[in-house]
Amino acid sequence: MATISASRMTNLASTAPPDLSVSSSGIFAGPSSQKFSSSDPPATTGDQNKSQHADKIQQSTEDEGWRKIVRNFTPSWFSVNMGTGIVSILLHTIPFNGSWLYWISIAIFALNVILFCTFFAVSFLRYTLYPEIWGAMIRHPGQSLFLGTFPMGLATIINMLVLVCVPVMGHRAIQLAWTLWWFDAAVSIACCFYVPFAIMTLHTTSLNKMTAPWLLPIVAPIVAAATGAVVASVLPPQEALWTIIASYILWGIGVPTAMVILVIYFQRLTMVSLPPIEVAVSVFLPLGPLGQGGYGIMKLGKLALIVFPETHTLSEHMVNAGEILYVVGWLTATIMWGFALVWLFFAVMSVSRMRFPFNMGWWAFTFPLGVFTSSTLQMGRELPSRFFDIFGTITATAVTLLWIVVAIKTIQGVANGTLFVAPDLASLKDKSKETDVEAGIPSKT
């Protein structure tokens, strides 16, 4: 009996149904698929090797030639337009001027237009060919801050359109400048609203990680407000009134928010330490909202002095509301100019204590100092004193020399390719590695 039972059990085992296990594709494997599954591992390994080889070829292609430039072209490049544009404006408006300075300012303005169009085209290619980079850039705590450099770079071009092109081209240049200004104002508001909210919700930060570039998206509407004052100076009275009111709103959006950021930044400097060497020059950025804010509020007050009586704005109960805005504007600008002197001292003393390598952050030297100089020169126009004219001319000369030095170093960095580095791409590589691990693909490293 034992022999028979053993024999029957052996036969049953030999005729037992195959194991209905679930394959990697989620389908139950039958006898034929079970046989096929024995050959799956070699095929899968081969597919993985092919995938890795294709990825290596694609990666090597993207890290060479024009694709490398496009992939690594960050928004910080528009800071070049900010620095170049403010130099052209200063050389055009400097009090001790000459025809040779005028033509130099025209040449720099033309260069700035070419650079801006080039940077815009490369940026358009970057986010069109590699749309995933846009999300990575927005989520990056450092690169997203430089979105504000785009409208500020465009604002310098709009200023020179009014100063240079309007006297030559007339109405067409006025309409172009006004249209571009509305676009610039809208983008500035978007940057000022969204980027700080992204810091609150998307980024993980702390006081020791806080740096002055937090001001970049905040300064954008302040620059748009000052530009609006320049554009309004060539508009008909009613259009000028709308532009002035919109510019006051832009000023109100940017300046109080910038003051909040300055308080946090001052706490960071005093409670933690000076910024790291890589971003040491960013200590000049506080001059931006203070200088441009002062210049803008003075220009708006001066225009309100003319436009408000012409349009009978706020004239029911007052003789001339523009006079009040003009005086308050000058007083506010004077206070902001004095506050800027404090930050200028902090900045000069900070950079004198350390040696730091060249990077795109060096453009933080030019624009903040430039708008501080613009505020100084505007005060010289409003006051019967040569002090501000002389001091503004000295700082304008310093800004121009700094621009030459930074431009030369930038050209050298472009030639050897060291400036084409995008920190936001690191998050894409990390995400790609995580996807490979989840799929069971061995690391390429």
Image (cartoon, rainbow, N blue to C red):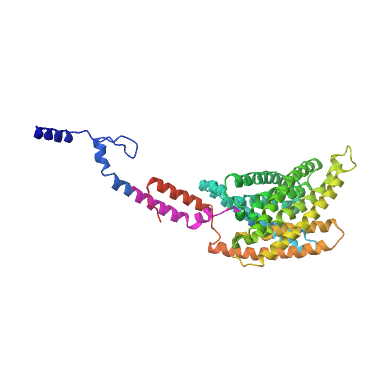
Which region of the structure is painted magenta? 47-76
Answer whether residue 390 is visible to the viewer in this image.
Answer: yes
| Depth order, front residue of 245/411 | 245
Q: Is residue 151 above or below residue 90?
A: above
| Depth order, front residue of 197/4 | 4
Residue at the image point whose x is 29% and y is 36% from the top? 21
Assign the N terminus to one quadrant of the image.
top left
| x and y percentages locating residue 409 in the rendered image | 60, 65
| Depth order, front residue of 91/35 | 35
Quick check: is 54 in the magenta stretch? yes
- Which residue is at the far right? 319
| x and y percentages locating residue 320 in the rendered image | 88, 43
Quick check: is 357 in the magenta stretch? no
Type of secondary structure dominating the magenta stretch: helix
| x and y percentages locating residue 172 in the rendered image | 73, 46
| Depth order, front residue of 62/20 | 20
Dividing the picture into quarters, in which one does residue 359 lie? bottom right
Horizontal side of 67 relative to 286 (left or right) equals left
Dividing the picture into quarters, in which one does residue 291 lie? bottom right
Count of marks placed on residues: 0
| x and y percentages locating residue 412 in the rendered image | 58, 65
Horizontal side of 422 relative to 408 (left or right) equals left
Residue at the image point whose x is 70% and y is 57% from the top? 368
Answer whether residue 100 is visible to the viewer in this image.
Answer: no
Dividing the picture into quarters, in which one does residue 34 lie? top left
- Which residue is at the far front? 2
Assign the C terminus to one quadrant of the image.
bottom left
